[in-house]
Amino acid sequence: ICNSSGSPLYVPNRLCENVLCHILDKIRNKAVVSKIHNASNDHLQLLHFKSSKLWIFILNATGEVNELLNHPHVESVRSKISQLVCAIEDQSITIGMLNTLVEFPNDILTGYFNAGIGTKKKKIANEMLDSLREQLREHSNTVEKLFSFYNRWCNKAEDTLAYLDDLTEKVNNLNNTPFLELVNPHYWSIHNEIIEVSRRAYQYENSQTFANVFEIDTNEEVQKSVLLVSQVFGDSLLERYQRICIEYKSWKHIKCSEARPLWNGITSEQVKHELDLMAGDATWYRQRQTQNDLLRSIEYLAQFPSSIKQLKNLSDVLTQFNIKNKEKSWAIEMLNTLENTDMILGDLQDFFKKYNKKYGAYRECWSLIKELSFAKEFIDFLLKELIGRDLTNLIN
């Protein structure tokens, strides 16, 4: 219409201005017919902002623009933008509205805001928008970490539901909550004492080793109260877990009997994740050979329960068949080694090389050995009534 391709828009004559005003009349009349002015303030603000490119051009237009800039619809939009800027400055803007706005880059936001307020007021700076965006991000992170703490570590507490309900209500009301309330010291109410602990505990949300330490260090009474659980975290639990992690710098000398409670219930597939979390950026863990050796040793440690069970089954079968010199058999020797409280992690690789060699030789027999270990009466019957003491008869 104006044959203007640059920015700002240049209106060369009254004819072009009249055409633009006519278009604005149509837009305004359509808005009146649709009763869009009855919508909430936030809804209207967002509708105007969706057309921010148009309003930046119109409000910054130069040339023949006297009637254009004084058009009722332009004045209405300018007033709305000015209200929005004031709400941002005094922090009365709702969190929901602000969350929507800060998804856009600063150049779009400042261009829109500053076009609306003109040169009479202090312009919105990038620093202010960055600060608001960071505070919203911090609020979102705090909510996420609180939910994580309550659901992961306080699921046995009798008052967890009260904390979850209050937090859920805050989240559900964000669209109507003024941003100013976020800086109110009473905003977080019952969550104030939990926030710092929830931030420190968040990285361990999916850690089974940390969960094992938690179960060891807390009793049923402590786990009945959210506040008591948070106090245990703050007073000792986090520090104790970190001390354990540091001890793994000398992992080869750690006794298996001491390590097993930490690794209880952890599968071979979970070991690397746990070790990565425990070691972090520690220099000693960056060495590839050390990392592989430790990983393999902990994987072997995770096999302890199943290996002990298999060897005990075999021991029972040897007893039931009255095998002579049973105590000198490889099965009993290996079982005693696994149950030895002085065995250290550094010995596991050599031990399991021998064990796996024996295990492989009996690979297809373990299911039978398991069944035989539960069949004492049947074996007694076989030995006494049918085949006597000659095992050749059993084999035949």
Image (spheres, rainbow, N blue to C red):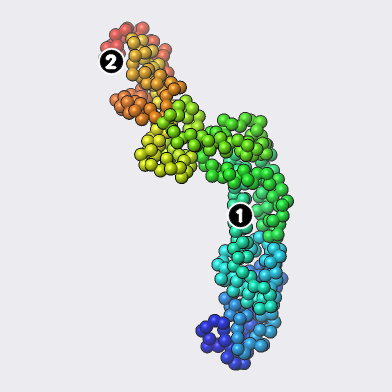
Q: Residue at x 51, y 84 (%)?
A: 5
Residue 303 makes an appearance in the image = no
Q: Position of residue 319 (x, y in %)?
A: 38, 13
Q: Residue at x 64, y 82 (%)?
A: 24
Observer-nearest residue: 278 or 392?
278
Question: Which is more N-terminal, label 2 or label 1?
Answer: 1
Which mark identifies residue 138? 1
When the figure is inspected, residue 256 is found, relative to residue 151, above or below; the finding is: above
| Quarter in which the N terminus is drawn | bottom right
Which of the 4 quarters of the picture holds residue 164?
top right
Q: Residue at x 37, y 21 (%)?
A: 334
Q: In what element is the residue under mark 1?
A: helix
What residue did someone put label 2 on? 395
User: At label 1, which amino acid type do we have?
Assistant: Glu
When the figure is inspected, residue 212 is found, relative to residue 96, above or below; the finding is: above
Q: Within 10 angstroms of label 2, few (less than 14), some, or many (20 or more) residues?
A: few
Which mark identifies residue 321? none
- Mark pair 1, 2: CA separation: 73 Å
Tell me: 357 left or right of 27. Answer: left
Q: Residue at x 28, y 15 (%)?
A: 395
User: At label 2, which amino acid type do we have?
Assistant: Ile
When the figure is inspected, residue 70 is found, relative to residue 249, above or below; the finding is: below
Q: In what element is the residue under mark 2?
A: helix
Q: Position of residue 267 (x, y in %)?
A: 44, 35
